[in-house]
């Protein structure tokens, strides 16, 4: 079976088999032990959809496919049930981190404000047996701040002999996997080396938080609630320098839709609870977001920082100009008729493909591009913005966009907790420890497919 855009005679991506679909969640005992009537029914395992494929090059191996199937609610409930049955000294500490783009989904589904939805979600997870629930916004702050510094460094370093621009964001795991496995060397040197928010959160939980709790990393089971399935694939590759060899920053990823299904099936009486904080004992911290319409806002924050640092220009309002379509937008900084900075946002693989073609041909006018695999950005992740028959839920997406837009924006630079962590955890903002913990490297194979020559 071939995907709709595949250039190969035979597609190497596998569909989900009947045997895989027959795996059910071992959760009824959990609901019964809580004295409730709820029963957790079978939840669908993660899968790679053939209709999503852009260029087939075995980017998901058979081994990864098997591991991907373990990234589901069954694994989550295995740990919950283990904690209920074993001695306290053997318990795993369950930590759940929630992506900022997942909260509007729960707000829309539960018909609550985003703050109340956050408290309801936290209360539900703790009623299941989760020990700590964190907001991942702080990890996104680190990712953006490091990306800002890296862009300014690349701008100063760039020359005709050493072409380190454009810088392409690396927070989207679907895009990064495609760049590494399919595009190769023409593109990977341009990927921002800053870790994604999920990878940063893995380090925060398994390193900083573990040390604060006097726990070895392997005693913590870290779950991330995310809007897309690609985060599951990213978790398979996560690691961090201060952990034990082979340890992962994230043990399991559940999509917003998977968590919502568990909530619907549970029948548990839930008492709202405040989200925990990594730094200090502050409770009821207001929900906030970064300055992005449906994403983490790397473009907006890096643009403002670069304008100030490189040209001493203060940019308050950013004007986006749609070019090919609404998912391909451009932002420029001009002075005296001269374009000083030209940034772009490219969402969806068709727009990504066009950018890559221009990059290969040397006709690339941009200094920085925010790249996301999902059209419309992270809010439109397939793990939450879909109907039961697998199509985009446009009504739900519009509702989520409205909710997300109303969340207050707080610049990463103004976060006192982030600055405190830089000093306490990373030994300073420009330390070797900060660079090792917050940055990564990418595979750079030779370009291994002719798919870049496809015309859209």
Image: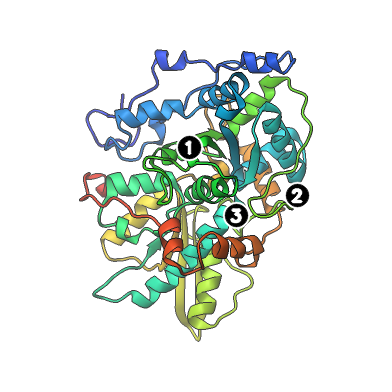
Q: Residue furthest bottom?
A: 336
Front residue of 110/97: it is 97
- Dots 3, 2 in contact, CB < 8 A: no
- Please tell me whether mark 1 or mark 3 is closer to you in this view: 1
Residue topped by disc 1:
218
- In the image, residue 388 lies at what x, y percent? 57, 25
Q: Residue at x 75, y 45 (%)?
A: 115
Mark before the other along the chain sequence, 2 or 1 = 1
> Tag 2's secondary structure?
loop
Q: Which mark is residue 138?
A: 3
Across and down, in percent, residue 275 comes to 70, 44
Residue 74 in view, yes or no: yes
* In the image, residue 118 above or below residue 64: below
Residue holding disc 2? 283
Spatial CA distance of label 1 from label 3 is 23 Å
The label shown at residue 247 is none
Determine whether 168 is above or below 43 in the image: below
């Amino acid at each position: 079976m071939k995907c709709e855009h595949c250039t190969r005679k035979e597609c190497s991506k596998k569909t989900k088999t009947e045997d895989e679909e027959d795996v059910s969640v071992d959760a009824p005992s959990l609901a019964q032990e809580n004295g409730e009537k709820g029963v957790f029914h079978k939840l669908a395992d993660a899968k790679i959809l053939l209709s999503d494929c852009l260029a087939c090059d075995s980017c998901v191996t058979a081994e990864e496919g098997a591991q991907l199937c373990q990234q589901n609610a069954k694994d989550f409930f295995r740990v919950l049930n283990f904690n209920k049955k074993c001695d306290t000294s053997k318990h795993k500490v369950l930590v759940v981190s929630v992506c900022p783009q997942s909260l509007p989904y729960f707000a829309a589904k539960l018909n609550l404000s985003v703050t109340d939805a956050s408290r309801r979600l936290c209360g539900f997870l703790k009623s299941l047996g989760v020990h700590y629930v964190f907001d991942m916004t702080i990890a996104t702050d680190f990712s953006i701040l490091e990306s800002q510094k890296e862009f300014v460094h690349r701008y100063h370093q760039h020359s005709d002999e050493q072409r380190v621009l454009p810088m392409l964001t690396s927070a989207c795991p679907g895009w990064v996997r495609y760049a590494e496995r399919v595009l190769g060397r023409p593109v990977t040197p341009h990927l921002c080396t800053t870790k994604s928010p999920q990878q940063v959160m893995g380090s925060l939980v398994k390193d900083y938080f573990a040390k604060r709790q006097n726990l070895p990393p392997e005693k913590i089971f870290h779950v991330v609630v995310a809007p897309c399935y690609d985060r599951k694939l990213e978790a398979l590759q996560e690691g961090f320098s201060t952990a034990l060899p082979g340890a992962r920053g994230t043990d399991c990823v559940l999509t917003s839709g998977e968590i919502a299904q568990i909530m619907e099936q549970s029948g548990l009486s839930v008492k709202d609870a405040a989200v925990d904080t990594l730094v200090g004992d502050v409770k009821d911290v207001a929900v906030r977001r970064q300055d992005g319409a449906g994403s983490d806002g790397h473009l907006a924050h890096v643009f403002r920082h670069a304008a100030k640092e490189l040209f001493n220009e203060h940019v308050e309002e950013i004007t986006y100009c749609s070019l090919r379509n609404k998912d391909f937008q451009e932002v420029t900084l001009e002075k005296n008729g001269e374009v000083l900075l030209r940034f772009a946002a490219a969402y969806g693989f068709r727009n990504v493909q066009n950018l890559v073609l221009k990059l290969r041909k040397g006709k690339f006018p941009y200094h920085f591009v925010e790249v996301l695999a999902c059209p419309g950005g992270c809010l439109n992740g397939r793990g939450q913005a879909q109907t039961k028959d697998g199509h985009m839920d446009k009504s739900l997406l519009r509702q989520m966009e409205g909710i997300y837009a109303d969340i207050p924006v707080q610049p990463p630079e103004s976060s006192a907790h982030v600055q405190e962590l830089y000093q306490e955890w990373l030994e300073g903002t420009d330390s070797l420890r900060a660079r090792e913990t917050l940055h990564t490297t990418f595979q750079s194979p030779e370009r291994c497919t002719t798919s870049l020559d496809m015309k859209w």
